[in-house]
Amino acid sequence: MKNRGFTLIEVILVVLIFSLAVGMVAPRIGGGALRMKERNFVTAMVESLLKSREKALASGKTEIFFIDSGERTFGVGQNAHGRIPENADIYAEGLEDLGNGRYAVRFFPDGTAPPVKLDVTFDRERQYIISVDPILNSVSWTEGTSS
């Protein structure tokens, strides 16, 4: 007698293994999407800082990168179009306080700026550090913790 098919136990076992695999993989995919959004935001901030620096070099005039904590926006010059996510907190060292919840980084015509450190923390857990380094004349970011 030929056996043509699967027994009920085999089918249940395969479904159980499949559901366990999906259960372990799905949360990791969701967490990866969240981290991707966070990195996209941090990258957008760094790109805006770099754009401010490049505009200062090209125009020969001081350019300003703004952060408006009240409106939760950031950007170059008066065009603060970038949105700061609701789950993000930004702690800063070296920003110029313009009053009314507005802060700035000034890039001078030679592309330099004072030292600035932005600590971007999401959900009070995940942290990214954006640095404006006047010695290296660079803008960079790292993931991790600050001391």
Image (cartoon, helix red, strand yellow):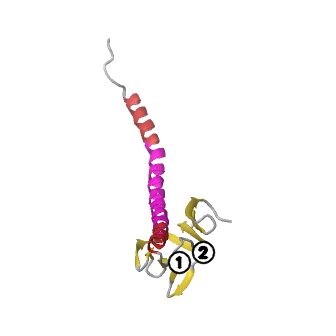
| Quadrant containing the N terminus in the rendered view | top left
Query: Residue at position x 48%, y 59% from top?
Result: 39
Residue ID for mark 2: 114
Picture quadrant where residue 129 is located: bottom right
| Quadrant containing the C terminus in the rendered view | bottom right
Image location (x, y in percent) of residue 125: 57, 64
Chief secondary structure of the magenta span? Answer: helix
Residue ID for mark 1: 106
Give, as a single range, the part of the protein colored magenta.
Answer: 22-48
The tag on residue 32 is none
Q: With 15 as the anchor, is 128 left or right in this view? A: right
Q: Callout 2, which amino acid?
A: Pro
| Residue positioned most to the right | 147
Asked if residue 132 is among those painted magenta in the image, a careful observer would answer: no
Label 1: state its secondary structure. strand
Query: Residue at position x 40%, y 28% from top?
Result: 10
Picture quadrant where residue 37 is located: bottom left
Image location (x, y in percent) of residue 15: 40, 36
Query: Looking at the picture, does residue 22 appear above or below residue 35?
Result: above
Q: Callout 1, which amino acid?
A: Arg
Label 2 – label 1 distance at C-alpha: 8 Å
| Residue positioned most to the bottom | 99
Image location (x, y in percent) of residue 82: 41, 71
